[in-house]
Image (spheres, rainbow, N blue to C red):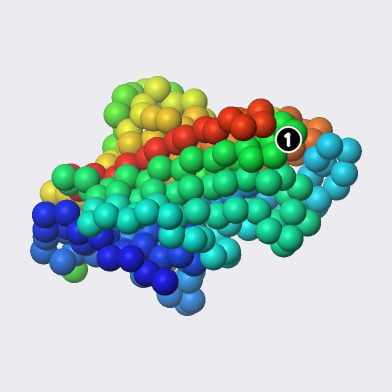
Amino acid sequence: MTFELKKGSLRATARTRGGELISFQDGEGLEYIWQGDPAFWSGQNPILFPIVGSLKDGRVEINGGTYEMGRHGFARGMEFAPVEQEEDFVTLELRESEDTLARYPFPFSLKVTHRLLEDGFSTSFTVTNTGTAPMPFCIGAHTAIRCPLRGGERFEDYELLFEEPEHAGSHLLNSEGIILHDGRRPMLDEDVKLPLDYHTFDEMDTIIFSMLRSGKVSLVHRDTGRGVELDFRQFPMVAFWTKPGAPYLCLEPWQGCAAWDNESGKFEDKPFCTVLEPGKEKSLTYAFSIV
C-alpha cells in the first residue's frame, strides 16, 4: 500500500512495505530519492532496526540467549500498518510478531512518521518498549539521494559540506562489515568540505563518522551549490555509502552501528545502543531540505 503526500508544490510517496518514503519531488518534478535499480542496488530508503550494520558471525547475545539477524535487522523487509494520515504526513507502525520474536525477543512498537516540510521532508522514529523487560535497540536511516541530480552532471561534481570544520576520520570495516577498533582513515583535517569520488568507496565501502561537531551536512554540486541538506543532530553517527559507478549517495543518520571486532557480543554493549525500560519510548527525527 502506498500513500501520496503533498504540501504546496512538494510531493512524496510512502509505502507500508518497509515503512519507507520512496519518492520526494520538488515543484519542478525533480526526484531526489533513488528509485532503485538491481544493477546497482534495488533499495531506496530502508529503515535499519533493531540493529544497524552487521553482527559478529550474524549473532548477538540477548539475556543469555543467542539470536541471529541479518545486516541492518528486519524492519526493512516487513509490512508496516498505517496509523494516521493527513495531506502532508503519514504514520506507519511495526509491531512484534512470531517472526520478529524469534530474532529479537521483545514486544515493541516502531512508529515512523514521514512529513513534508516547507522545503523538504522529515522522518521521525518512535520506539516503544511494550514489554516487561529492558529492551536494547539500535536504529538508523539509509536514505539514497540521487547523485547526480540533474542531466549533464557527474558524481564527482558533488561534495559533502559539513556545518562545522571537522577533524575526523572514518571508522573502518573489515570484509565481514565489522568495525575495526584500532584505527580510522583520516578524512577531514579541520575542513568543512569532503569531495566525492568513486575511488574512495571502492577502497573503504562506507564512510562512517561518530560524534562530529556538525549536526548538519549538505550534498551539493560544488559549482552551483544546489542539492540537499541533512539535519542529523539527534543522531551520534552519520554514514555515507554508494557503489562505485552508481548514481546515488546514501546519507545515513545512525543511533548504533555494526559490531566492533573487540566488543563483548552482548546487545546492550553495542556502541550507541539505547536501552528502553518497560513502558518507555524514544523518538529521533532527521530531516532533508532542498538547497
Q: Is residue 183 left or right of residue 162?
A: right
Can the viewer see residue 12 in this picture?
A: yes
Can the viewer see residue 177 in this picture?
A: no
Q: Tag 1: Cα neighbours inside 10 Å, few (<14), some, or many (≥20)?
A: few
Q: What element carries label 1?
A: loop
Quarter holding residue 270: top right
Q: Residue at x 49, y 40 (%)?
A: 126
Q: Residue at x 47, y 35 (%)?
A: 283
Task: Give percent across and percent down for residue 109.
Answer: 57, 46
Q: Is residue 123 left or right of residue 100?
A: left
- Asked whether 173 or 288 is in front, the reply is 288
Q: Residue at x 32, y 56 (%)?
A: 85
Quarter holding residue 189: top left
Query: In the rendered image, which quarter contains the C terminus?
Result: top left
Residue to which mark 1 is pinned: 132
- Identify which amino acid the numbered label 1 is placed on: Thr
- Asked whether 130 or 193 is in front, the reply is 130
